[in-house]
Amino acid sequence: MTTRPLWAGRSLALLGILLVALSLRTPVAALSPILDQVGRDIPLDTVVLGVIGSAPPLAFAASGLLAPLVARRLGLERALMAALGAMVLGHLGRTLAPESLVLTFASMVALLGAGFGNVLLPPVVRRYFPDRVGLVTALYATLLSVSTGIPALLAVPIADSAGWRTSLAVWVLVAAIAAVPWIPYLRRPEPVAASPTETVATGPIELGAVAMEDAQAAATEAAVEHPGAPRGPRLGVRMLRSPTAWSIGVIFGSSSLAAYAAFAWLPKLLTEHAGMDDAAAGALLALYALMGFPAGLLVPVITARFPRSSAPLALLGMACFVVGYLGLLFAPAAAPVVWVASAGLGPLLFPLALVLINLRSASPASTVALSGFVQTVGYLLGATGPFIVGILHDATGGWTVPLVFLLATVVLILPASAILARGRSVDSEL
C-alpha cells in the first residue's frame, strides 16, 4: 500500500483525532482530585463516592456494547460528534450540579461520551490513516496519558483559586474544541473511507484479501458506511466466536484490571506494606502512571512495523507485571521504585491492544465491532480489580493475598499471547 504524507488531504482528521484523545480522560481525572471541595457544597455520602469511583470502567464497558450500534446508525463521524456532545453536556451538568444525584448522573453522561470515544477512535484511525495506523495510534495513545495527567495536575490549583465549579467548567471547553475539526465531515453525503485495497500491510496477515472474501463482513461494512442500509449479522455478536478477539480483550482487560487496582490501592499498599509515607506513596503512583508514556509512543509503531512482535510484546508486559508484583510481595521496602516502575511498564498492553484492534480487523465495520467487543471485555475485567483487591485486603488484613491475586490474573496473558502468535485477523475466524 502506498504511504502518503501524514497531513496530505487529512489534516483536519488528524487534528480531530488528537483533540479527541486529549479530551477522553478528562471525565475521569478532573473530578476525583477535588471531591473534598465538592463535598463542602454538595453532601457526598459513601454510596455516592462508591458509584463515582466505580463508574469509569462500567461506563466504558457499556460503551463497548452501545457505540458500535450507534456507529452503524449514524456513521463514525456523527457518532464521534455525539460522543463529544455527551462529554460537553456531562461536564456542564457537573459544573452546575445543585446536588449529588445530578452530579452522579452528569458524570455518567460524560463517562459514556468518553467511552464512545474510546471505541470509535481505532476505526476512525483506520478510515483516515490506513497507511499510518501505528504512528497515529502511538500519537493518540500518548495523548490519552497526557489527558489523564493534566486534569489531575490542574484541578486542585484551579479549584483553590476560582472554585471547584470553574475547575470542572474548563473541560467543557476542551470537549467542545475537540468537536470543531469534525464539523466539515458532517456535511459530506458519505464518510471518507479507504478502498478495499487500501488496508494496512501486516506481513503474514492478508487483511485486504480477507475483507474481499468475507461477504458478511462486507455487508455490515456497508451498513456503517451508509447509515440506514440493510445490515448483515451483527458483527459484535459474531466476535464471541473469534479467539483473536478474545485474546485482544484479555490483553486489554489485564492492563485495565492492573491499572484500576493500582490507582485505587497502590498508595495504601505502599504505606502499609512498604512503610512509606503518604507523600512518597503518592509520588510512586505518579511514577506508575508516567511509565505508560514511553510505551504509548513506541509499542504501536513497533507492532505496526513488525506484525510478529505482538506476542513477544504481550509477554514482555506480563514479565514487567510479574517482576513488579513479586518485588512488592517479597521485598516491598528494598526497592519500591524499581517494583512500581516495573509494574507501571506492564500496561504497555493497553497501546498494544489499541493498535491490534486495527491490525487484526479487515474492514471499518469489523474494526468498530472488534473495538466495542475488546473494550467491553477489557473494562468489565478492569472494573473487578479494585473491588476484588479491596475485598481480599479487608478479609485478610494484609497485602499478600491481593498481590497473589494480581499475579494470577497476569497468567491469562499466556494463552492470549499464543493465540496472537498465529497472526490471524478476526474476519478470518467469523
Image (spheres, grey):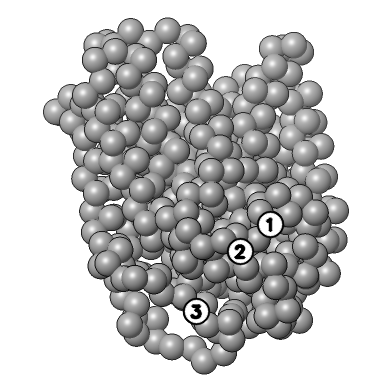
Q: Secondary structure at mark 3?
A: loop
Residue 144 placement (x, y as % from top left): 44, 52
The amino acid at mark 1 is Pro
Q: Nearer the viewer, residue 350 or 64?
A: 64
Residue on which the image places disc 2: 220
Q: Nearer the viewer, residue 140 or 10?
A: 10
Disc 2 versus disc 3: nearer the observer: 2
The amino acid at mark 2 is Thr
Q: Secondary structure at mark 2?
A: helix
User: 10 Å neighbourhood of mark 2: few (<14), some, or many (≥20)?
Assistant: many
Q: Is residue 83 left or right of residue 116?
A: left
Q: Residue at x 52, y 92 (%)?
A: 2
Residue on which the image places disc 3: 194
Residue 146 in sight: no
Disc 1 versus disc 3: nearer the observer: 1
Q: Nearer the viewer, residue 324 or 45?
A: 45
Residue 333 placement (x, y as % from top left): 66, 31
Vertical relation: 355 (above or below) 146 = below
Residue most extreme to the left: 162
Q: Earlier in the sequence, mark 1 or mark 3?
A: 3
Q: Disc 2 versus disc 1: distance between alpha carbons?
A: 7 Å
Q: Residue at x 70, y 73 (%)?
A: 215
Check whether the beta carbons of the residues at disc 2 and disc 1 lie within 8 A of each other. yes
Q: Which mark is residue 233?
A: 1
Residue 244 in sight: yes
Q: Disc 1 versus disc 3: distance between alpha carbons?
A: 22 Å
